[in-house]
Image (spheres, helix red, strand yellow):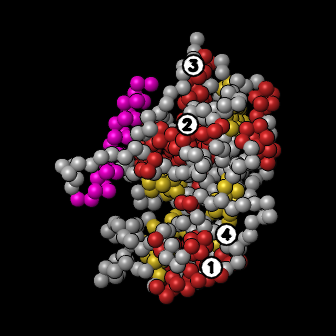
Amino acid sequence: MNNSSKARVLVIGAGLAGSEAAMFLAKNGISVVLIEGKSLKLNPAQKIPSFAELVCTNSLKSMDPKSAHGILKMEMKSMGSYVLECADKTAVPAGDALAVDRELFSQEITKHLKANPLVQIVEREAQDPLKLKEEFHCDYVIVATGPLTSKPLEDWITKEISGDDFYFYDAIAPVVDADSLDLTKMYFKDRHKPQTEGGDYLNSAMTKEQYTAFIDEMVKAEKVAPKEFEDWKFFESCLPIDMMAERGPDTARFSCMKPVGLVPDADVEGKWPYAVVQLRKENLLGSAYNLVGFQTRLTYKEQVRVFRMIPGFEEATFIHLGSCHRNSFLNARKLLDFDLKSKKFPEVYFAGQITGVEGYTESASMGLYVAFQLLRRINGQEPVRFPVETAIGALVNYIMTIEKPCPSNINFGLLPAVELTKEQYKGDRKKAKKDMVSKRSQDVFQSFFSELV
């Protein structure tokens, strides 16, 4: 008899990583107890009581198979990703990106988990994972509590595993009511693409004068101050827009407000605008838009005042305003084995953003990775190292080797470099290298994974 028929796993947290892990195990015959407390009390970043809520943006990033995010998605789909299956069902137009209707996505995840006979949902706040394991007669625990671990569980982790250094800060972008925008001052276009029937992104172009005034007001605006006991440590690729403004007048213009590839069709001279604010659909109806890259520390009052300086936003109504929130993560290199189980408590695994990755897809991939490794253990097999040439392998290698923990998205910088000979080099050298890395990743993963299943 397969050992999986006897196993029982406790999963703490029904976010992206926890939902992915729970469904993977259930699909493979494992009984799962899924503990989630948000129906009892939402944390400061949460808005809805259903599972796998996307709190920052509705985008799961690029689907381009030649991008790092695209490579990761292909690997996850090969492993049977439940999260990506639900994302595909609830997708909204977003060019090459995979963006979803947040509420429909969360409802889809919740519906299938609750309907699965091998998944027992328990609504309560988790505290001590080891005591919960005993209470629910489980053999293993996966802690997948995401970036906002509840205080009782955080206290247990800090006391028993991590010590004091257990967090950094992230920020949420505002969402605007589409009907409140003046579309005569805006245009639809996807970056670098010819405009035929309109793009998926709504753009608001700024002149140099408009941009300069906007950045000046951003710098002067009142921000939410950290508490006395807090030390704000932001993830570099998800900086608040106001922090970008403080770093220098052109920082935002070379980041989320870069105009490259966004020339309006009406511009007969074909010149780039000085800066551009991009908006992405928040839902299938297109009744709300997310301000791309506009995470912020500004107070609510100042957000309304400053963001109404954006052309087309003069009478804007905001459905959700931005905010900052604390994210928790472990020093994986010091505290976990490569299969992400605790060195101190071998029956306890960690998955998702708490392991030191950043991003929706990355977090879900770690839930999938941990569930895959745990299934092997249940079936009497040794854990297996994913090749560093693969996206999943690169993420695990990163969190397990970096000396000073700093959460990271998947990117080509995590994958081993390739050498490009003169014979191979034609045209864009950077693009050619990425194409080679992409092809190598796909070939290595297919060869590696086909031997395991």
Instruction: Calculate the distance from the C-alpha at mark 3 to the C-alpha at mark 4.
Output: 48 Å
Where residue 268 sits: x, y (%)? 30, 83
Q: How many marks?
A: 4
- As for residue 199 lying within the magenta part, the answer is no
Which amino acid is tagged 2?
A: Leu
Q: Residue at x 58, y 64 (%)?
A: 239
Instruction: Calculate the distance from the C-alpha at mark 1 to the C-alpha at mark 2.
Output: 41 Å
Is 83 placed left or right of 320 in the picture?
left
Of all residues, the one furthest to the left in this rendering is: 423
Q: Residue at x 46, y 59 (%)?
A: 93
- The C terminus sits in image quarter: top left
Q: What stretch is highlighted in magenta?
A: 427-452
Q: Do the residues labelled 1 and 2 touch (CB within 8 Å)?
A: no
Which amino acid is tagged 3?
A: Asn
- Crowding near the residue tagged with mark 2, few <14, some 14–19, many ≥20 C-alpha atoms within 10 Å: many
Q: Which quarter of the figure has residue 230? A: bottom right
Which residue is disc 2 drawn over? Answer: 368
